[in-house]
Amino acid sequence: MSLLAFRKGGIHPADRKELSAAATITALPAPGTVIIPLMQHIGAPTKPVVKKGDEVKVGQVLAEPGGFVSTVIHSSVSGKVKKLADVPTAGGDRVPAIEIVNNGEDIWVDGVDLDATEIDFSAADDFKDRIRDAGIVGMGGAAFPTHVKLSPPKDSPVDALVINGAECEPYLTADYRLMIEKPREVLLGVKAMMLVLSVEKALVGIEDNKPDAYRAMRAAATGELAGIEIKLLRTRYPQGAEKQLIEALLGRRVPPGKLPFAVGVIVQNVGTCYAVFEALAKNKPLIERVVTVTGRAADKPSNFLVRLGTPVSALMEAAEVSDDAVRAMISGGPMMGRAFRHTEIPVVKATSGILLMDAEEFTARQERDCIRCGRCVDACPMGLIPCDLAAFAEFSNWDAAAGVDDCVECGSCQYVCPSRRFLVQWIRLAKAQRRRLKK
Amino acid sequence: MTIYLQSSPHIRGKEDVRAVMFQVVLALVPGIIAAVVFFGARAALVLGVAAASVLVFEALFLRMAGKSVKDFALDGSGLITALLLAMNLPAGIPVYMIVVGAFVAVLLGKHTFGGLGNNPFNPALVGRVFLLISFPTAMTTWPVTALADMDVATAATPLGLFKTDGADALSAWLANNGYVNLLTGNRGGCLGESSAIAIILGGLFLLWRKIITWEIPVTFIASVALITGIAWAVSPDNYANPAFHVLSGGLMLGAWFMATDMVTSPVTRKGQIIFGLGCGVLTAVIRLWGGYPEGVSFAILIMNGFVPLIDRYMVPKHFGARGVTA
Amino acid sequence: MAIVTAAVFLGALGALLATMLIVSARKFYVYEDPKISQVEEALPGANCGGCGFPGCASFAKHVVETRNADFFCPPGGAAVQNKIAEILGMTAGTAIAMTAHVYCKGTDEKAKSLGTYIGIQDCTAADLVMGGHKVCPFGCLGLGSCVAACQFGALSIVDGVAVVDEDKCTGCGKCVSACPRGIITMIPKGPRVVVDCHSGDKGAPVKKYCQVGCFTCMICVKKCPEKAISLVNGRIEIDQDKCTQCGICIDVCPQNVINGYLGAGVIS
């Protein structure tokens, strides 16, 4: 069986997944205080419906959607609301957040059945609303509200659901462990979404560096789930980028500036599928997620099931991170994650991993002039010329840098550049300046 | 304890500028060995003087530009310029000319434009062409190879033979183990243009290590073969055959090492094809109908001038721009 | 004979070309007030745009066409303004010399940084893309965008913070737009007392991240005998018209945020 793959560009870094690949998902105890940001997604900020002093239960609604493209925020612990304040995020900006002191009793709201294992597919009409009410957003990192994604425009008919099990970022193993340990639950979530979208075709793409995940998912795709195709993909970064994933699995290319529904496809992450399962089977809102804590500075790399709002310091302590060895702290993977410094930042819906890099993994280098070697052109999966885009940005020629609109910031160009140029930073600068000029 | 803050990505590939440059130097080793075998210790002197001069001048100009001498002088690019310049010189060239050539290559070819990455023209070729125009006799006096007849001290290159003495003289030379000599390097010429095999070996190494792409060498050599082939087919008495053209002169060195210089060649694959074709066509035209017996240096320099234009228009299509199913 | 032919031919050619030139000069002549080139010659010729016009020629044209000697050329200063007034036959307007002022003294030692920044050495790139590497979201990043923007070499980075040399500053204002944090503003040259902090935060967090950050304790507001200090848009500001430079606020400020400047930017 030949491997499916995207055609152009990409890189093949050492995947370093062996650090945490064998670590079974372990539930981290809920911390004494959780900080739950009101903005954990793409779209309109949510509006709080609780105030200081309120008593809340696990799964209770803390904030309601602030628009159509928005989501619901729930409490991940039971306890008392301490305050509403602005907190820093991994990206450096501050967002309003609700701080709750955990009373340690873990009292859930009514209606949640934590032991349920099946979804009642006859009630499919309610699924989209229940997904919205559960506060589910894209768990692969983009955090786009799932119920909105499952509502493509009427004039763009969708015929296929693509599930992203590629987890192409090095180091991260959260989706991998989920597929090994809970394959049936993931597929049940997939089937639910197939019903919501009324599609018959669903494909799960898994990179071939995860053979046991592939086998586990194949084994679980039986009975009512047999219609879901499990496909093996060639391991190459960024195989998990949605446009590349769609090209590999279906041979369709999303045109520049358009979204996957333009070619009749909706893409969801396996973590999102699991959250959908929990919402529809157990009535459980999104209050926890699997986070990989890894990197050579962590003595005990792990995959934790973490309550949202847990400060990253708790994860670092549980993974026995040696403070002296750490040289860089990343939220996410090494290719697209954001460097952070405050260890009090909370785990949010989009946090797929925490990477603690030591001096061997992270080397600080300044950039040199571009030597026009063309490796960035070969590496770019979107067909851009990154060295030229960076040059336009360097000389403030924002009009000429129009190509940045198609950049997905995967980082392949910067990875291969021998002159160590900060290509993605230049491109991001161009994007920000172009946005400013449009206003 | 330092914690670093950087915009993503936070990991990098292993190859930096120095690694790239030193692999090119490594690829030149077979050619250098062939040069020393065929032209003796003098060849080694030429190489050594070139390397030393380039290093000194680079350090001088970097100092004047206020750049870190340590970071830039030893990144390998200067060494490549020196070795390629030396490989483009005859073994008997006076030492002071090598120094002049190195000075011009480093100053006019590289640092007046802002250093590595900013120069539009191949520095080694700039130096070489400057020497060719300033000292034409010294630059066209070829010592015989160590394995040749020891009756004469100097001899013409096969291409030169053809230009001055005509097709018959060339045929006579070729009949006398000519092709083997062309391949192995047992013939008059510059240090680097003698042994086609040694250069090809180096070029294949660079291809394997993905330092260069196949587009430029293949299109360059193919277009030379095509044009000289057509000319030879039309009039075999007036023109040499394409196999001879491909193996002689500086074509191999030019196609594998000079035209593929990353700074002065296009960044996109489509652009590289145009560039290679242009170099080949110009080389063939100069050889067949121009005044000089050898056209590679001029052809590459002319095409270097077109590279910004090529890069501007030979732009790849963005993902999905060609249609949903390509 | 050949020489006669050559002479006649070249002479005729020369005459023809000369005629063409004379005709075009007359036909396409554009009247320009000679005062415009006089004013332009009086200008420094830096084309810095500090006057608000795109270049010295444009400024000269505008001044002469509107016969307005009030337009001010910052690099030229009072001397050039007087000259322009003389050329136009008017009295010079009185313009105030302005200088750039950096509202931050958070050096590497005094302001906490989040980490060692690895990236493009430009403040806008660091701020827009990653939020900067200092804990204080309002302070100077010290990467030198303002230094690069200044044509007159009046700015430099000292200990990680931008510093203005008022003698060299011509008031052109390029650094103001270059700073992504907006902490450089143009203020009149001369003795003044300034609160050197634009932090929008209040209270304890400010003290944690900067030893010279203003945390809005309001002591200076209370102690000022002329009532010159007030809270404007969340920031403490001193009204220079009311300020008598008594220095009481400088003494009472617990964070040493307030500084006094004599004419040439020297702290008293």
Image (spheres, coloured by chain):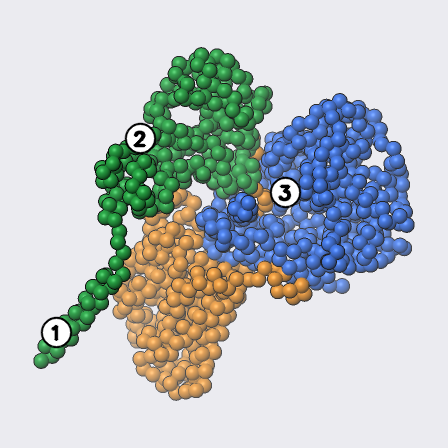
Chain colours: A blue, B orange, C green
Q: Do labels 2 and 1 touch, CB within 8 Å? A: no
Q: Nearer the viewer, residue A319 or B162?
A: A319
Q: Which callout, 3 or 1, points to the residue nearer the camera?
A: 1
Circle on res. C7? 1
Q: Quadrant of residue A139?
A: top right
Q: Is residue A154 left or right of residue C206?
A: right
Question: In which chain is the residue bearing label 1?
Answer: C
Where is the C terminus of chain B found, in terms of image quarters? Answer: bottom right
Q: CA distance from mark 3 to mark 2?
A: 56 Å
Q: Which callout, 3 or 2, points to the residue nearer the camera?
A: 2
Q: CA distance from mark 2 to mark 1?
A: 63 Å
Near mark 1 (Cα within 10 A), the count class, few <14, some 14-19 or many ≥20, is: few
Q: Position of residue A224 (x, y in %)?
A: 89, 54
- Report the amino acid beneath label 1: Ala
- Badge 2 and badge 1 in a common chain: yes
Q: Quadrant of residue C240?
A: top left
- Report the amino acid beneath label 2: Thr
Up the image or down, A273 lies above or below A103; here it is below
Q: Which residue is mark 2?
A: C94
